[in-house]
Image: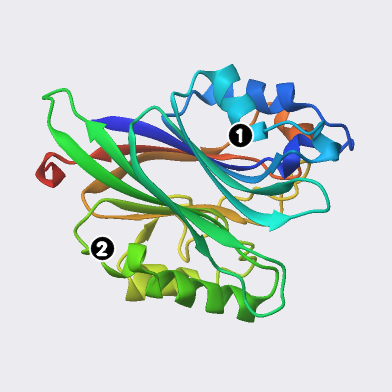
Amino acid sequence: MRFRVVSYNIHRAVGVDRRFRPARIVEVLAHHDADIVLLQEVDEGVPRSRELDLARELASALGYPEIAIGHNVSLRKGRYGNATLSRFPIERERNIDLTVGSRKRRGCQHTTLKLETSHRQAHTLEVFNLHLGLSAREREQQIGMLLCSDEFAQLPSTVSCMVGGDFNDWRSLLRPIFTEVLDFACATDHGARPPRAIRTYPSFSPTGGLDRIYYRGPLNVVSSRRCRLKVSRVASDHLPVIVDLELRGGGLR
């Protein structure tokens, strides 16, 4: 079984031209037609985005039947955070608080998805959609908080699992934690040695690989890339990453 995942910091659908244009985000996502979409910086009820519930607007426009929203930051009016759109049933969801001290509120949205293969066998996929802080020390603490959460700590290493989103990890300091300690692989690395992250930021001339997807369990990467649509260079300050994954038969349950 193959499925596609996109991770995209949509910057509240405000492009690098400072215009609120959710139709551009819809165009980018519709082109890639992913089964699972991990979004960051998604507004709800905020004046700058016409007080729309952006996650639900995007899900409706793109035809996603399942949606989970994890709000992290409350504003004077409205709030924003992460959202997961899925063609697969969402069996459970919870927003994990990753806020460090008095720093800006951050979070990781956990969803458990139920995949059904062509042989009508059920398979569980655990998905963690996060947006980490701006300092290296803060990000390290946030990953520690994630690992100690019930949702992550209780998962056997053999279970299909993805951790994706905006890591803000310019120097790939978190990669060894995932790949050497936690036995994840990075789906959004180039094949070079040493591996390099696919560059996604800033969208108009990418120099940093901030948007990543790590995975473990009975999954193989078929392909990974960043979006190359012209509209994506202005739709947000990040480019989305697109990963095609294959579920190995031995992981079915």
Whether residue 240 is visible to the viewer of this picture, yes or no, is yes
Q: Is residue 22 above or below residue 114?
A: above
Q: Quadrant of the N terminus?
A: top left
Give the numbered dot on residue 16: none
Q: Quadrant of the C terminus?
A: top left
In three-dimensional space, the C-alpha distance between marks 2 and 1, rounded to whole angstroms, equals: 28 Å
Q: In front of the other: label 2 or label 1?
A: 1
Q: Secondary structure at mark 2?
A: loop
Is disc 2 surrounded by few (<14), some (14 to 19) or many (20+) residues within 10 Å? Answer: few
Which residue appears farthest toward the front when viewing the image?
77
Question: Label 1 belongs to which residue?
Answer: 55
Q: Secondary structure at mark 1?
A: helix
Name which residue lies at 62% across and 77% down.
Answer: 100
Mark 2 touching mark 1, by CB under 8 A? no
Name which residue lies at 52% across and 25% down.
Answer: 32
Q: Give the residue type that dot 2 points to.
A: Leu
Horizontal placement of 251 versus 157: left or right?
Answer: left
Q: Give the residue type that dot 1 points to.
A: Ala
Name which residue lies at 22% across and 55% down.
Answer: 159
> Residue 48's x, y, as percent?
85, 38
> Residue 124's x, y, as percent?
24, 44
Quadrant position of residue 246: top left
> Residue 213's x, y, as percent?
46, 52
Whether residue 111 is visible to the viewer of this picture, yes or no, is no
Name which residue lies at 33% across and 71% down.
Answer: 182
Quadrant position of residue 136: bottom right
Of marks 2 and 1, which one's residue comes earlier in the chain?
1
Front-lying residue, 207 or 250: 250
Front-lying residue, 43 or 116: 43
Question: Label 2 belongs to which residue?
Answer: 155
